Image (tube, rainbow, N blue to C red):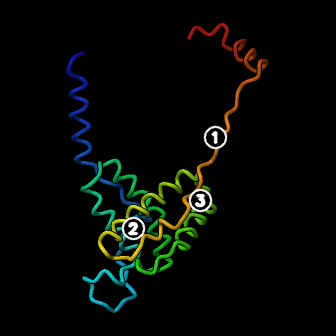
Amino acid sequence: MKGNKKKAESMLQDARKNFEIPSESVVEQATQPIETKSTQDEDSPTGILFTDFMLEWLDMMKYRVEVTTHAAYSFNVKGKIAPYFKEKGILLEELQAKHLQDFYQFVLNKYKITTHTAQKYHANIRQALQHAFKMDMIRFNPADKVDRPKKNQFVGSFYTNEELNQLFEAVKDDPV
């Protein structure tokens, strides 16, 4: 069947162009405008909530990464990061390493996520804060002071000789 690969790649490209991230109630809450604590003018980077900054960064990343990568970033930021920090009301310039450490501990304990998932949250936050640092919105990147959660050590398991014999016996007459 010649030409199927090219046809499939073309369909994939079309799907990527037309892909939209689904809207959920958590996502909608995270994207609603939030009043800032500061009385400074709105064009000033000071006074922006960390949540608002993360959402702006996410919007900017839409044009810098693949659609699937942006979807993963959106899932992380809108699903867990923005709702947590929205509730805290922390300004970007007031964000400290302790706040980030508290967030990682919170999601690890409440949602029972893996440390690998927490590392992805950390990567998104660190990348966004690095952008804020480069844009002179913050003096340093507080994520650089946080030790990212350690990945769980993989513990493999294996069959005993007796278990292997039972398995072989069970599938002995199976034609597949």
Q: Where is residue 169 in the image (x, y as percent from the top left)?
A: 72, 12
- Mark 1 residue crowding within 10 angstroms, few (<14) / some (14–19) / many (20+): few
Residue 22 appears at what percent x and percent y?
35, 55
In the rendered picture of this protein, how many numbered marks are placed on residues?
A: 3
Helix, strand or loop for disc 1: loop
Q: Hey, what amino acid is under mark 2?
A: Leu
Q: In which quarter of the image is the N terminus?
A: top left
Quadrant in the picture for residue 162 = top right
Q: Name the residue under label 3.
A: 111
> What is the three-letter code of the residue carrying label 3?
Tyr
Q: Which residue is drawn at 51% across and 67% down?
A: 145
Residue 158 shown left or right of residue 75 in the figure: right
Q: How far apart are marks 3 and 2 (CA)?
A: 24 Å
Spatial CA span between label 3 and label 1: 20 Å
Horizontal side of residue 59 vs 87, given as left or right: left
Proximity of marks 3 and 1: CB atoms separated by less than 8 Å: no
The residue located at (70%, 27%) in the rendering is 158
Earlier residue among tags 2 and 1? 2
- Quarter of the figure with residue 160: top right
- Label 2: which residue? 129
Query: For the residue marked with disc 1, what is the amino acid?
Result: Phe
Give 69 or 78, whichever is nearer the viewer.
69
Which is in the foreground here, disc 3 or disc 2? 2
Dot in front, 3 or 1? 1
- Closest to the observer, 126 or 111: 126
Is residue 154 shown above or below 30?
above
Q: Decide which of 22, 137 is in the foreground and name it.
A: 137
Circle 1 residue: 154
Query: Mark 2: few, some, or many residues within 10 Å (few <14, many ≥20)?
Result: many
How packed mark 3 is, by other alpha carbons closer than 10 Å (few <14, some 14-19, many 20 or more), is few
Q: Residue drawn 41% across and 73% down? A: 140
Q: Which residue lies furthest to the bottom in this view?
A: 39
